[in-house]
Image (cartoon, rainbow, N blue to C red):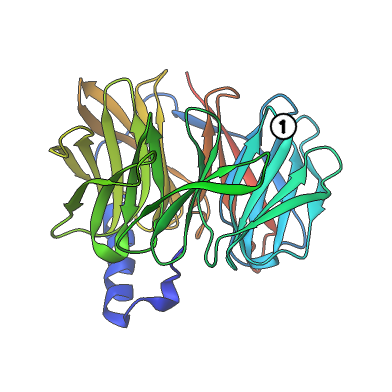
Amino acid sequence: MTQLSKFPLAWIALLALGALTSCGAGETSKGPAPLVLERTIALPGVSGRIDHMVLDAAGKRLFVAALGANSVEVVDLAQGRRTARITGLAKPQGLAWLVDRGELMVANGDGRVAFYDGVTLKARGVVALGGDADNIRLDGLGRPVVGYGDGGLATLDPARRVVVATAALPKHPESFRIDGARAYVNVPDAGRVVVVDLTTGATLSSRRTPGLRFNYPMALDATHQVLAVVFRLPARLKLLDAATGRARLETATCGDADDLFFDERRQRIYVVCGSGAVDVFRATGPVDFRRLTSIPTRQGARTGLYSPEADRLYVAARATEGQPAAILVYKPAP
């Protein structure tokens, strides 16, 4: 993920302004809170940035990429505590849990994608992609697709530990989503949302985002073919028609967002923001959402994971001078 230190100073100032001005806008809920903090699970000894997470639903374990600590933290959700760690990594970012193989995948900033036994956590193999391995998603066949380098997606065969297909992109990919053979990809350094065919590697469309910068989070409602993208400058949530790219909605949201999820059961959207909030939007029409409320979290807690299976939103909070790093577990209500 691109770090704030790489941004020009003028952009940093604008990002900070967006975080301050956008979090209070929109509707305010007068009823029960749509997200209730159920528990806080401390991660002692974890410092610096925390990146993505993945859930082993059957094993009730949450794997957390502690990028700043060069580790993956293993959280037992039944016990409510960390029970294991994988250490000695190189800026771990993306994670995937391979249910059929009982393996954990870890994408590292040095380009290595490592496989670990899900029980022993011992290394099983590595695929080297050359640089900045980041987000991981699973395609319709259960094969991992990894965003990496200066601009590419690589589809891997997890059994043979080899790359079986690639798709070129104009710059480094951030969040992406897969629907069939198509991948919808945020490419913020190019100011685009790109659609590629994962089978052929062909670019199907490359859509500019005029007036909006730093499109990092993305979510897809495949049922209604709605693509949700959040921009950091200015802080905006935008809904697009997945087939045509046509804008359906644009509205203000909280600042420094890095994760975004549809809760289809409740017809909601959750935007996880480093400004210290989760913005909750609710559907008021077929393709219309309005901000319901903003749930306070912690400053810098910008990565999360919503699991429909567990029906929980997990938010990763980095350590501060007064508090250790932690996973904030929110239960949606009603």
Left or right of 229 on screen, residue 275 = right
Q: Which residue lies at the image location 34% right of the left edge and 22% below the top edge?
A: 267
Can residue 187 be spotted in the picture? yes
Question: Would you call the spot at circle 1 few (<14 residues within 10 Å), some (14-19), or many (20 or more)?
Answer: few
Q: Nearer the viewer, residue 32 or 248?
A: 248
Q: Which residue lies at the image location 65% right of the left edge and 37% below the top edge?
A: 97
Depicted 116 relative to depicted 187: above or below: above
Left or right of 46 on screen, residue 301 = left
Q: Which residue lies at the image location 56% right of the left edge and 50% below the top edge?
A: 52
Q: Which residue lies at the image location 32% right of the left edge and 81% below the top edge?
A: 9
Q: Nearer the viewer, residue 23 or 14?
A: 14
Left or right of 147 on screen, residue 58 = right
Q: As drawn, which residue projects farthest toward the right? A: 120
Depicted 250 relative to depicted 274: above or below: above
Specify the amino acid type for callout 1.
Arg
Q: Position of residue 107 (x, y in %)?
A: 60, 55
